[in-house]
Image (cartoon, rainbow, N blue to C red):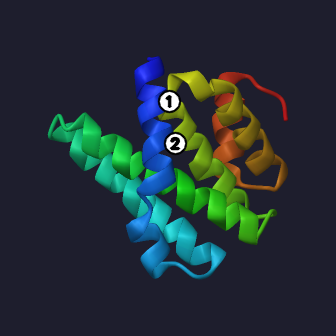
Amino acid sequence: MKQLTVALVVLIAVAFIPCIASAQSAEDYLKDGIASLDMVEDALFSYDKEAAYFWLGDALHCFNRAIELNPEYAAAYYWRAECFIWLEDYQKEARNDYITAARLGFKPAQDYLKGKGIQW
């Protein structure tokens, strides 16, 4: 698992070309991040873990950038939490992002937390 975490950090550091090339606003970064998550699913469907981690790193970068640009952007916290769910070492971060999104009024995050019995 540590090798996967190291690989992800490396990918996050160097693999943001699709996201950086097209996004300018927080909303653009969110859209690009969601598109990258679609690519994660496609890569996993093809049993290509390397590509999946590449796209996961890109999605994380996009959601981080959206949050930087707009710290009140609930959807970005929610989608970043979805990324963290893929990474078993980041469950605490996922929970924190779901809670932040719920507190900012994002209904899917509120529903997710209710389903897990977690108060926000």
Question: Height in image: 22 above or below 48?
Answer: below
What is the quadrant of the C terminus in the image?
Answer: top right
Q: Tell me residue 101's x, y (percent).
A: 74, 50
Q: Horizontally, is 90 left or right of 59 in the view?
A: right
Q: Which residue is mark 1?
A: 87
Q: Looking at the image, which residue is at 70% across and 26% down? A: 92
Q: Are marks 1 and 2 in contact (CB under 8 Å)?
A: yes
Q: Which residue bears the numbered disc 2?
A: 83
Count of residue discs: 2
Residue at point 45%, 60% (across, down):
34
Local packing at callout 1 (Cα closer than 10 Å; few below 14, some 14-19, many 20+) is: some
**Which numbered circle lies on residue 65?**
none
Residue 46 coordinates in the image, percent (x, y): 14, 40
Q: Is residue 30 left or right of residue 66?
A: left
What's the amino acid at mark 1? Leu
Horizontal arrangement in the rendering, residue 57 relative to residue 82 (left or right): left
The residue nearer to you, when weighing 119 against 5, is 5
Question: Which x, y percent locates residue 51?
Answer: 27, 45
Q: In this rendering, is residue 23 above or below 88?
A: below
Tell me the residue at 60%/48% (across/down): 80
Query: How far, Cα to Cα, is label 1 from label 2?
Result: 7 Å
Q: Position of residue 39 (x, y in %)?
A: 30, 54
Q: Residue at 69% across / 33% down in the picture? A: 93
Residue 82 quadrant: top right
